[in-house]
Amino acid sequence: MRTVPISTIHVVDDDAAMRHSLALLLGVFGHCVLEHTGAATLLDAPGHLSGCIVTDLRMPVIDGLEMLARLRAAGSLVPVVMMTGQGDISTTVRAMKLGACDVLEKPFAAALLLDAVRAALAVESGAPAANDDDATFAARVSRLTGRERDVLHLVLRGRTNKEIGQTLEISHRTVEIHRARVMTKTGCECVQTLVRRAARTAML
C-alpha cells in the first residue's frame, strides 16, 4: 500500500456510522480527521480550508455536488474525493468537471480510499502525482479505432447505448461491441474508472 502524506482530512457524511468508520480508518494513518454532518460548516469559511475533503455525494439540504460547486465558486481549490452509493455516468462526469479528484462507488476497499486521499493530498501540496497510469491510458486511447473513439466520447458525455446508436446511426448490438472493445483496450473495469482517467487526461 502506498504511503499517504499526513494532513487534515474533512469527512462529510450525514450517515454517522459511515462517517465514524472513515474517520477511524484515516486516523489510523495519522491524519487529523475532522467530522462534519453536512456541508454548512465547510462552506462558512471556504478560503481557510486545507488538506482535503472526503464527502458523500447524496446528503440532505446541500449535496456533495452542490458543496463542490460552491467551494469552487468561492475560489477554494481544496481537493475533494466524492463517495456515492448510486453512481451513474452523468453524475461522475459532473463531479469530475467541477474538479473532484476522484469519485468512489460504495462499497469500496480501504486501499482505494487511501490511494484517492494520497492523490488528493499530492494535488493540495503541489507535488506531482504518479502519472504512469494516465500515460498508459492516453496511449491506449490513441490506439482505438475512429468508431471506438466516437463511442468513447459519447459514453463520457453520459449517453446511453440507445442514444449512442441513434447519434452514430448504428445498431444497439454494434454499440455494445464497440463499447466492450473500448473498455478492454483502455484497461478500464467499469465506466466510472473510464471517466476518472479521461478527466485526468483532459478528455472531458
Image: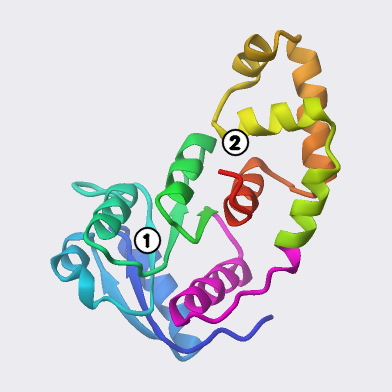
Instruction: Say whether residue 130 is magenta.
Output: yes
Instruction: Give the residue type at disc 2.
Output: Leu
Point out the image quarter for the C terminus: top right
Percent x, y for residue 200? 59, 57
Q: Vertical placement of 49 versus 44: above or below?
A: below
Percent x, y for residue 27? 43, 85
Q: Which residues are magenta?
A: 107-133
Q: Residue at x 19, y 63 (%)?
A: 43
**Name of the residue lying farthest toward the left:** 44
**Cα separation between marks 2 and 1:** 23 Å
Percent x, y for residue 105? 54, 51
Residue on which the image places disc 1: 55
In this image, 146 relative to 74: left or right?
A: right
Instruction: Give the residue type at disc 1.
Output: Thr
Asked if residue 86 shows in the view, the reply is no
* Occupied quadrant, residue 20: bottom left
Name the image colouring: rainbow
Instruction: Say whether residue 184 is magenta.
Output: no
The majority secondary structure of the magenta stretch comes to helix
Percent x, y for residue 144? 83, 37
Within-10-Å neighbours for mark 2: few <14, some 14–19, many 20+: many
Q: Which mark is residue 156?
A: 2
Q: Earlier in the sequence, mark 2 or mark 1?
A: 1
Point out the image quarter for the N terminus: bottom right
In this image, 1 relative to 202: left or right?
A: right
In this image, 153 relative to 87: left or right?
A: right
Q: Residue at x 59, y 51 (%)?
A: 202
Asked if residue 1 shows in the view, the reply is yes
Which of discs 2 and 1 lies nearer the camera? The answer is 2
Helix, strand or loop for disc 2: helix
Q: Nearer the viewer, residue 27 or 152?
A: 152
Q: Vertical placement of 61 versus 123: above or below?
A: above
